[in-house]
Image (cartoon, rainbow, N blue to C red):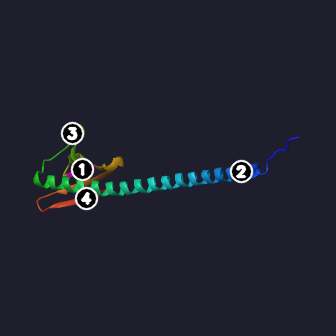
């Protein structure tokens, strides 16, 4: 009669099961870290775009100071400023207030900002910024 030699079989199975469980846990942990990193990076891009949109508001105010009748209406082409990562979408005059709409668009994390400005003989007054 032949004798079966299965002495190390159970040990190999236990090692493979523990290795599989550890591999699954490490993969899950890596996925969670990658998701957190992506969320943090997206938040950073949105914060940057917040300030880029304000930079475009400043540029639109400068354009208004140089040309009181400067306007960009709804159907007109927006002014793209790639060096500031923003666009001036709309500048329209309603009464004595100019309404400015801009967008910061770095890495497609768009942030829109809106401002109302009163330009007069004595200077520029920012009425509201959203």
Q: Is residue 130 visible?
A: no
**Along the polypeptide, which appears first: circle 4 or circle 1?**
1
Q: Residue at x 64, y 50 (%)?
A: 20
Mark 3 burial class by Cα count in 10 Å: few <14, some 14-19, many 20+: few
The mark nearer the N terminus, 2 or 4, is 2
**Tag in front: 4 or 3:** 3
**Residue 129 horizontal/vertical position (percent):** 29, 57
Query: Image quarter for residue 115?
Result: bottom left
The secondary structure type at the circle numbered 1 is strand
Q: Can the viewer see residue 120 in this picture?
A: yes
Q: Is residue 121 left or right of residue 130?
A: left
Q: Which mark is residue 127?
A: 4
Query: Which-is-in-front pick, marks 1 and 3?
Result: 3
Q: Main secondary structure of the magenta part?
A: strand
Are dots 1 and 2 in contact, CB under 8 Å?
A: no
- Say few, some or many: other residues with alpha carbon within 10 Å of mark 2 (under 14 / 14 to 19 / 20 or more): few
Give the magenta-colored segment's residue range.
97-102
Front tag of 1 and 2: 2
Residue 128 in the image: above or below residue 9: below
Query: As drawn, is 28 to the left or to the right of 37?
Result: right
**Percent coordinates x, y for residue 45 in the rendering:** 36, 54
């Amino acid at each position: 009669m032949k004798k079966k030699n299965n002495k190390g079989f159970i040990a190999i199975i236990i090692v493979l099961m523990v290795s599989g469980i550890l591999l699954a846990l490490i993969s899950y942990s890596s996925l969670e870290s990658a998701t957190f990193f992506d969320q943090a990076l997206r938040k950073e891009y949105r914060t940057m775009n917040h300030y880029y949109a304000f930079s475009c508001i400043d540029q639109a105010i400068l354009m208004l100071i140089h040309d009181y009748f400067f306007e960009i209406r709804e159907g007109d082409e927006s002014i793209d400023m790639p060096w500031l990562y923003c666009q001036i979408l709309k500048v329209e005059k309603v009464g004595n207030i100019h309404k400015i709409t801009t967008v910061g668009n770095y890495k497609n994390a768009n942030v829109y900002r809106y401002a109302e400005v009163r330009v007069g003989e004595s200077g520029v007054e920012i009425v509201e910024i959203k």
